[in-house]
Image (spheres, rainbow, N blue to C red):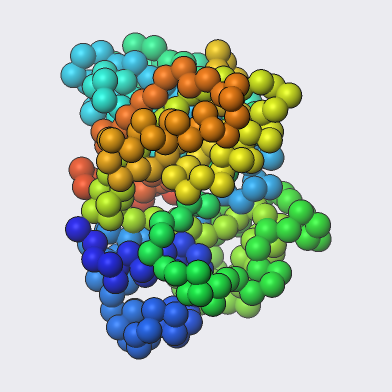
Amino acid sequence: MLSEADLALVHALQVRPRASWTDLARVLDVDPVTVARRYGRLADRGEVWVGASPGPRLFDQLCVAYVEIDCTAGSAAGVAAVLGRHPQAVTIERPADTHRLLVTVATGDVAAMSRYTLDVLSAVPDVAAVRSSIVSHMFTEGGRWRIDALDAGQRSRLAAPSGSGGDDQAAGSHEITDRDRALLGLLSVDGRASYQALADGLGTTAPTVRRRVDQLVRLGLFRFRCDFARPLGGWPVAVTFRASAPVKHLSAIGHALVRLPQVRNCAAVTGDHNLLVQASLHTVGDILAFEGRLGDVHPDVVVANRTVSMRHDKLLGRLLDREGRSVGVVPPDVWREPAA
């Protein structure tokens, strides 16, 4: 299990994923060498990692779907392994009913989503059925989720400098170039890589990379996120709730739900139920209490079903082992043409 000191470092990196060791050490009340050594140890074991995440403006460009896949008996693990190599299948979960997968899929547009879900997925051996719920609006995604290991003063001291976050009014093109895709691939492997290391990988200069990274963040296209092996950190329970809410109140409900600390993802979706909420919880016993909080947000929110994920095989491009440790990376180049 991760220690309290480890979790404090995780929370600090969730707030400022690329903060200097000096800034992190000042808040954690240790010396910079200790912080760097601790992160290196955790990263080497695949228990903590920093990567790139879609920013809010990027969701305006992409097509995202939550896809349920029925597999033939005994084949779910094999299907998950195949899909793990697909950059479009950014997250793969195995629910309690062992013949199904829940896959978060992202593509460059609706046409690419149709090719991936209708042509590529249906051709994968042992896939029996595919059901897709297209995201019409993403209220929040996993990169905004925070654990609670730092006090308010520590969080305040780590707050990002003014102007360093995504800004709807930031000037610049929102087009993602081939160079940006390559940059995203490098940052997916190591979100704390130095600008010089990134420049070496791209064949350019460190100042050029720094300017582009800063611009992509200001434009709200990219952000950085820290993830960790959740079962080892005390969050072994992941639950997906599908619910129905009045359309005229859906936006207000979604923005209210994202303020609940357990919520990892929240989206308006197509299909029989127009709201999908994913939560990270400490115990199975917390499911009922959290579902009650969903109802407290608005009396007309009706939960239709809840699905407990027994294991994540992939999380935003990271391949995971049974304990949630990172064992590899498939950069989520969601703009690539879907192929088996």
> In the shown orientation, is residue 249 left or right of residue 146?
right
x%, y% of residue 267?
A: 57, 33
x%, y% of residue 224?
A: 52, 60
189 or 323: which is nearer to us?
323
**Quarter location, residue 281:** top left
x%, y% of residue 203?
A: 54, 69
Question: In which quadrant will I find the C terminus?
Answer: top left
285 or 100: which is nearer to us?
285
At x 48%, y 82%, the residue is 23
> In the shown orientation, is residue 189 left or right of residue 95?
right
In the image, residue 132 sits, relative to residue 45, either above or below, namely above
At x 48%, y 74%, the residue is 154
At x 50%, y 65%, the residue is 15
Say whether residue 121 is visible: no
329 or 46: which is nearer to us?
46
- Number of numbered discs: 0
In the image, residue 142 sits, relative to residue 160, either above or below, namely above
In the image, residue 249 sits, relative to residue 99, either above or below, namely below
At x 25%, y 13%, the residue is 72
Question: In which quadrant will I find the N terminus?
Answer: bottom left
x%, y% of residue 32?
A: 37, 86
Say whether residue 148 is visible: yes
In the image, residue 159 sits, relative to residue 331, either above or below, namely below
